[in-house]
Image: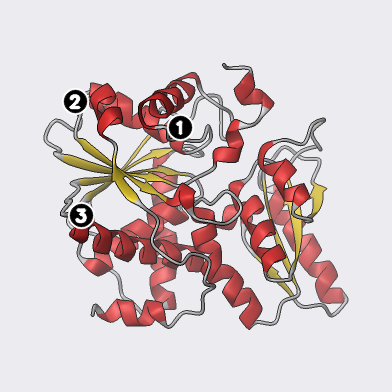
Amino acid sequence: MNQWSTRLDALPRLSLAAEPTPIHRATRLRASLGGPELWLKRDDLLPIAFGGNKVRSLGLVVADALRQGADVIITGAGPLSNHVRASAAIAAIMGLRCEVVYWGEPPQRAEGNHLLTRMLGADIGFTGDADRCSVDRGVDALAAEHRRRGEKFYCIPRGGACPLAVLAHVLAVRETLDQLARLDARPDIIFMAVGGGATLAGWLLGTALFGASWRLESVTVSRPSDEALSRAKRLAMEAADLIGCAADLQDVEVAVHDGFIGDGYGAPSKEGQEAIALAARAEGVFFDPVYTGKAMAGYRALIAQGRFERVRTALFLHTGGVPGLFTASVEKML
């Protein structure tokens, strides 16, 4: 067994999934797109609260909150956040309160993940400030109030990007390698969306620790590519420190591509919606408008540009987020 597997397995975690998420060959989608043989890793099928790899991350993060004796989880992001929806769900399952800070003003209509978070019983507040960083100040203010009252709380950073979340994605790398060996599939590239950076960080670190030979290709959906990559590398090194690992990321090939954010983080794009419709009609698989839809749009464009001419096989990470389709902003683009 790889020495890092033992250290990873020693981390407290919740049993949120009984088996690995599926990997399947997307034959019809590949025929529509051209390019390499295409496989999908289906973290959207994790069996809690509409799934998504935020559930995977929270298996370690909420276990740590319970270990510390927390009664309440405090976190935040935008009103349509996958992380917040998953946090509220797992808090409810584990008997914890969940307090949420959203940036901006309350919307006139609760929809998508915001609606689900309300259903899950989270206490929700809005900062009144469109700056995403206002969430961080709001989380700090709630923490200070709980501290003043002598209550036990646990803060999860905005969007859930933290070292423990990264280690959950390192475990996903190990899971994926085991599955691919059984399938006799050997992807040359792993393709994903990059937002807060924890997923890419986990795949960077996992690729290094387990000696995978693939290249990591990604599309940023939130911030400029150089900032996204720098953030992911920092998170990867912080996660490595948690398991006492002097990780060397230099040998991991990685690229982060700009040009597919559209009007901004969280706003559907025309190219993303086209990619979502293409995948739905080809495979019966729905990507989301914030992450995987834009990533698939990027994958499609890069194929057209000839970037993957020498790539035989690609694995696309479906990180979830399907509730994002059920919003007025998506409806307007149909």
Q: Earlier in the sequence, mark 1 or mark 2?
A: 1
Which secondary structure, mark 2? Answer: loop
Q: CA distance from mark 1 to mark 3?
A: 26 Å
Of 74 and 49, nearer the camera is: 49
Q: Which residue is mark 3?
A: 183
Residue 2 vs 134, above or below: the answer is below
Q: Earlier in the sequence, mark 1 or mark 3?
A: 3
Q: Give the label on residue 293, or none.
A: 1
Q: Residue at x 43, y 46 (%)?
A: 228
Q: Amino acid at mark 2?
A: Gly
Residue 305, horizontal then vertical, whole percent: 23, 23
Of all residues, the one furthest to the right in this rendering is 149
Of 212 and 183, nearer the camera is: 183
Which secondary structure, mark 3? Answer: helix
Q: Residue at x 79, y 46 (%)?
A: 127
Which secondary structure, mark 1? Answer: helix
Q: CA distance from mark 1 to mark 2?
A: 20 Å
Of 91 and 75, nearer the camera is: 91
